[in-house]
Every structure is written in C-alpha cells, then in structure tokens.
Image: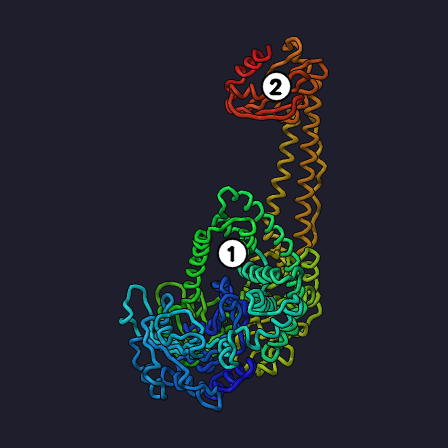
Amino acid sequence: MKYMTSSEIRQMWLDFFKSKGHSVEPSASLVPHNDPTLLWTNAGVTPLKKYFDGTMVPENPRITNAQKCIRTNDIENVGKTARHHTFFEMLGNFSIGDYFKKEAIAFACELLFDPKWFGFDQDKLYITYYTKDIDAKNCWMSHGIKEDHLIPLDGNFWEIGEGPCGPDTEMFYDRGEKYDKRGPELIRDDIENDRFIEIWNIVFSQFNSKEGVARENYKELPSKNIDTGCGLERLCCVMQGANTNYDTDLFQPIIKKTEEISGVKYEGQMAFKVIADHVRTVTFAVADGATLSNEGRGYVLRRVLRRASKYAKSIGINKPFMSELVDVVIQIMDPFYPYLHEKKEIVKQVITAEEKQFLKTLADGEKRFALIAEASKDKKVISGSDAFTLYDTYGFPIELTIEYAEEKGLTVDQAGFKAYLNEQKERARNARKDDQSMGGQNEEFLNFKAESRFSGYNTTNQKSKVIAIFGNAVVLDETPFYAFSGGQLCDKGKLDDTEVIDVIKMPNGQHLHVLAGDTNPFKVGEIVWAVVDKENRDLTRKNHSSAHLLQAALQNVLGSHVHQMGSQVCSEYCRFDFNNYQALTDEEIIKVEDIVNDFIKEAHPVKTLVLPIEEAKKLGAMALFGEKYGAQVRVVDMGVSKEFCAGTHVYNTEEIMDFEIASVESIGSGVFRATAVTGPKAHELLVESTQNIQATLKTIIEKASELVKKAKAEGIELEVSYVPANLEEKGYRYILALRKEVAKAQNAVKELEKEYNQKKSQSALKSLDQYDSLIEGDKLFTTVEVKDTNLIKDMASALRNNKNLNVVLLASCDGAKVTFVCAANAPYDACAIVKEATKITGGGGGGKKDLAQAGGKDSSKVNEALLHVKEFLK
C-alpha cells in the first residue's frame, strides 16, 4: 500500500470510477436544496435520492462523488474517539439500475488491491456480508479473498423505513496486534476497537421493504441499485499510517496552528481534536449558506462552534481565534473546493462575531453554574436536570460540569444526565429514520420511456397525440403544457373540453397531464387539441422573470453570498426564498424593490440559450445553489441576470411593467422569504395583501370614535387629532406607510384616552363635595362609581388633603370584583387597612403607608368590608 495525500486519495477514487464509465457528480451543498426533511446533507447518497426513488432518471446510471457531509448526532464523542467527526467527506460509487453485486465487488477489489490504484495488501482486509447473501460471499472469494477473512453477520442488511433496502457488505482494514491483541471477533461481536478500521460499505439495494411484510417476502425492485460509502478521513488514516484520523494531513495543519495560538503542545488532548473537527464543520457550513441561530440548522451550527470555543478555554485560549484557522482549512481543502476562497471573508466574519458573543454566554453559563452549585451544596450532588441544562442551554460539556463540580467538592448525577441526553438522542434518531427513508419506486412510471417533447416555449396550443394513459392522466407525444418544475407551477388549460388540473414531470422527463373528474375520456392514439390558458401563462412568465431580477437585486444590495433557497412562481405572485446572515432593514427592502423596477424600465431583452454546462458557467450564468444539471443547460439571459432555468419567461423585462414587494419574512435559520406581485394590477394585489393591516387601522379608528361618543354622554368633549393620510405610495413603501399610519392612529388613541381620563379626573375632583355628608370625624368610608384605579387614587388623595381627613377608604365594584384604595396619614397604615378589607371579600393587595390598593374577589360583601374596617379602626 502506497502513501498518498488526502487530495491524491480523493482524486484517485474519482479517476478510477470515471475510468469505469461513471459520471463525476460534484459535491452538493451541505444545506439540502428542496428537501425540508433534512437539516444537513448527511451521506453521499443524500443528493441522489431522487434517482434511487425513481423521481428522476440520471443521464448516466453510473455515478461517483466525493460528498461533504455533516452529522452531529454523536457530537459528544468527537475528540474522544479516533474517528468520530461532525464534518467528513464520503467517497461513493453508485449504480442506478445498471451494474449490480458482481461488478460492484469487482470494482472494489480492483481499486483496493491493484498496485496501479491503492495497492492494499489483500491479507489486511476482513469483509463482512449478510448471512443469507451467499452470492456476495462467492463474489469476494472469486477475487481471492480467503474464507477466514469473510465474516457473515445477520445485521448486514440496510433498511430504514419503507422503500429500497437490501444486504450490504463492509470492508475492514487490519492495523495489527499493536492496536489490539484480539482478532476478528472484534468485528463479529461489534466491539469498539482501533485495530480493525471500517473503510468501505456497499449496499445492494434490491428489495422494496413494506411494513408488516417479512423480509424474506420483500419484492424485488424493478431497478436494482448500488449505494456505497467510503470515509475519506478513515482511508487517509489507513493509507498514511496514522494512529488516528487527527494525525492525517486533513487535520494536522489545523492542530499545529492551534498549538501556535495557544502556546500548548499537542499530545493527543481532546481540545485540539474538537477544535480541528469543528472548525472544518463551521467553515464549510457557513460557506454553503448556513447561518447561526437558535433554531434548526442554525442552532446545531451554533452548538458546534461554541463547543470548540469552550474547549479552547481548556488550553488557554480566551479570545476569538477560530477565524485564524479558517485560512488553514481552506488551504487544505482548496484543491477540491476552490469556492471556499470566495466565501473566506464572510465565513471569518460570522465565526468571529459568534465567538465574541459566546465568550459572554460562557461567562453567563459560569454564573448559572455558580447558582446551581450553591443550591446543590447541601445534597453535594448536581442533578442530571441541571447538568443537562448547562449542557443544552449554555453549551457546557458534561466533562466541564464535572470538573467545575469537583472544584466545589460536588459530584454530578451522570446517570440522570445521560437519561436526559438519551431522550434527546432518541428524538433525533427517530427523526433520522423518517429523514432517510427513500420511499418506494413507481415501477410503471420508471418503465415508461416513450419520447414526449415539450413545445411550450414556442406555442400555447396545438394538436397532439395521446401516447399513454395512466388512470385519469395522459401523456402526449408533444405538449405545450409546462409541468411543475424549478419552482414554477404547472400550466392550466384544456385537452379538448376536458380541464387539465395538474401537470407532473415523470421520471424519464415526460409531462403527465392530470385531468379533472374520475374518468378519462381519451384513448391511446387519439388526436387532441391541447390549449394552455394563455392569460395564466403570461402572468406566470412575468412573475418568474421577476424572480430572476429579484435575486440579482438582492445580491446587489446584500452581497454575493445571497442565493436562492427555493421559490414558487405562479400567476398570482412571485415567492422567493433566500439566505442571509440577518434580517433585512426596511431601507434594504425598498432599495431591492427600486432596483428591480429599474431593471424593468431599462427594457432588457430576454434571451434563452442551450449550452454545454461549462460554457454556460464561463458566461457567468448562475446555477441554482445545490441543484444538479445535465451536460447541456438552458440559460435565461436578461443582461443584468444570467441563470440556469427551464421555466417560461417574458421576452423583454418591460413586459413585467411593475414589481411590488408585499413582504419579507424569516422562515427558518438564516432563510428569508420575499413575496412580490407584478404586472398592471400589482398595486391592486398588494393592497389586497394588506387587509390585516387595514383591518387593524379600521379597528383603531372605530375605538377612537366610540371613546368620543362615550365621553360626550358623560358631558366630556373630546377632539380626535388623528387625520387619515391619503396613501399613494406604491410597493413596499405603501406597506411601510400603512404601518406608520397604524402607529400614528394608535398614538392618537392613547392621547385621546389620556385626555379623557384627565378630564374625567378633573370632573370627579370637582365633585368631591358630594361626599361631605359621609365623613365621620377624620375618616371617610364609601363606594364610588369610578372604575379607573388611577383616578380613584387621585380622588382618595384629594379627599384626604382637601378635607383634612386621616383615613379615606374608597371601594369600586366591577362585576364580581372590587377595588379598594386607601389614602391615610400617620399613625394610620393604608396598606394594613386595605388588607383588612380583603379579609371580608377575599383577595389581597399592598402599597405604602400613605397610599395603598387591594383587589377583592366578592363585590357583594363590599359594604360589610367597609363596616369591618370602620370597626377595626375604632
């Protein structure tokens, strides 16, 4: 076996499979595109799910890749073991209905053992296979693998949920007795060890699993597949003769830089490993558009970064430092991921900002620990619940909590902590099971390969022949109907007199027209008149073209890091999802809107070109982030925007006429959704979209009107200062103006209420003489009709001061409840007096000796309460 660098190993893998007729699939983004079930791309097969479940048919059924992945379910083991990582690269080779078991094993043997390639010593490999998969065993033996190096295991069957499944075979490299005296039983009994390193797994996907069906009765898949995974980090460890993955060229430069920053020599400390692993994760994730937040993907990423920052403290690093390691990560990975250079500065900015924030959070966590420790000193144990709170909320690893606890003479309930941790893991595990199920294949659709052409770029109506029928749906030899794709909703229209309610793209590219009703009136071979609803198509074209202009404007205002995360365009609106590191300001939204409208007024011709993908990239055409394309791509060129796109568009940007943003909102971790409307009725549609704001404004105005009427009935004259503005602004400016109008109206109502209360207070205070007959010496006990507590306080204070009284107790009933207010002079205690009143009515209250209030629960006893207080004060 030859020594090879990580770059050489990766490239040799791809070159080998390319020589075997495989297409090299570029690594997909770590942020899955159009797959809401996944937080991260977590396996080499993840971006290829659409091929395995039959949703799409690849141009080449043989595919190879080096896929960057993130998994954080075992994050607490990263740094402890030799091979756990949160970021890793998975090398893979895949067959979608092409070669199968015999060829896959032959390829593995040639790549691993041939001196031209990796040149492994065959005797160093041990291989597991599914106990009942004798074919796999015989294939391995036919290539010279000794029978005592082949280990049958019942567990070698890949199956997650319903859908494609099958036996698998795993390859282990034996590093010798110096790592463990025990032999193959370590593999057979699944014992964690450092001697036998699993380097490659091949899944023979040949069955369709069904709930309630025994495995031996699973049906064969119509299209058998090969799915493999080989961890680059593990392969480097073996081929570079390293003790652990961290001793390879993927990690050592990062560790050496960390030594330089910390001034501490690396001797296997966990902190160095955690930092080296986690900085790779954060660098790639942020470069791929992920952001840090308190939810979903952003929360996971924040936890990874903070864990590294925390461990840095244990080797004396107490400042933001990880941005210095980003340069090293990029230098290591640059040969295969040159795009990292473009993202370097924004990655460093994000990491530094988060580190600064975390240093404060860590200090908060230490304060929280101090409180927990103080509360735990009697029992001498920090509970599992508290330890988990420190772990989950403040990012304290359990080891750090234990270390801090020991310093305080405390222990930690580790079993309790593990129980909380396992509960969290179980939730994550269940979620992963749901995420990774690929679903069953539709054999009928997969096998339908008749040619059908889309003609809708040039026409919206034509005669076509029915070439296939599937229930209440038909396929035509040629169709003007656009199928739902790339975020553009399908066309509406008719086949003869029958309404088309949906158009679906089939696995082999044909357009399936779903008809209204339960019966299908057509027959194969019949000629039909296919008519697309032209008005619907034209409105959709305008919205789709505006989505392209919107992306260009967003990048202009926010930066080149912005890219499309999803979209939906139809006849009614344009909805565009994009990434950004923070919410947009109102000024930024207005600027984006203005730029799009400038693009429209500039009347840019819209051209479409079909080009080889590399030529399209050289033109500067933008691919949808994370999307996969064939050798030929369609480019929509608007001058100010060039994008890969198969959708329908205007012929000149001036056709769009008007573009108005209705909203920009956060829909997840660092992902925002802009909704806009276009065309001659854009402003009308925008006004319709603001019905909730307008309803709020109407309610406020009605409230002001009711208050004026109420005041007038009480002999109080009020004047409303609010005058509705005549809002003529267009677009997002109209939204802002409407919001300002709501705020202005709310302030006017507040002022009106303030004026009402002041005038009512003045009126009430002027009529204090009405209580003269109720005064008993230096005291007054009475009920009042006033409901406003502040006004009652004013009355009580005024009566005490103006009438030279020492105790004034006023009671105001409101339904079953009663409010007591007491104003008193020494030696009387107002607080004690109101509490005495609530002994009769129930409730409670408090305040100061000179002024207090209380709430009672039973207003029917108010007179009894006043008498009780009167007796109490005698």
Q: Position of residue 392 (x, y in %)?
A: 52, 54
Badge number at residue 744: none
Q: Residues within 10 Å of mark 2 (few under 14, many from 20)?
A: many
Q: Is residue 807 above or below residue 127?
A: above
Mark 2 = which residue?
Answer: 810
Amino acid type of disc 1?
A: Ile
On the rendered structure, is 417 left or right of 315? left
Q: Is residue 730 above or below residue 797?
A: below
**Spot occupied by residue 482 in the image (x, y as percentages of width and height):** 50, 71
Secondary structure at badge 1 equals helix
In this rendered view, identify the residue nearer to me: 232 or 677: 232
Q: Is residue 575 visible?
A: no
Q: Which residue is mark 1?
A: 398
- Please tell me which residue is depicted at 41% across the width and 86% down the height of the picture: 122
Asked if the residue under mark 2 is in contact with the one under mark 1, i.e. CB atoms within 8 Å, the reply is no
Observer-side mark, 1 or 2, equals: 1
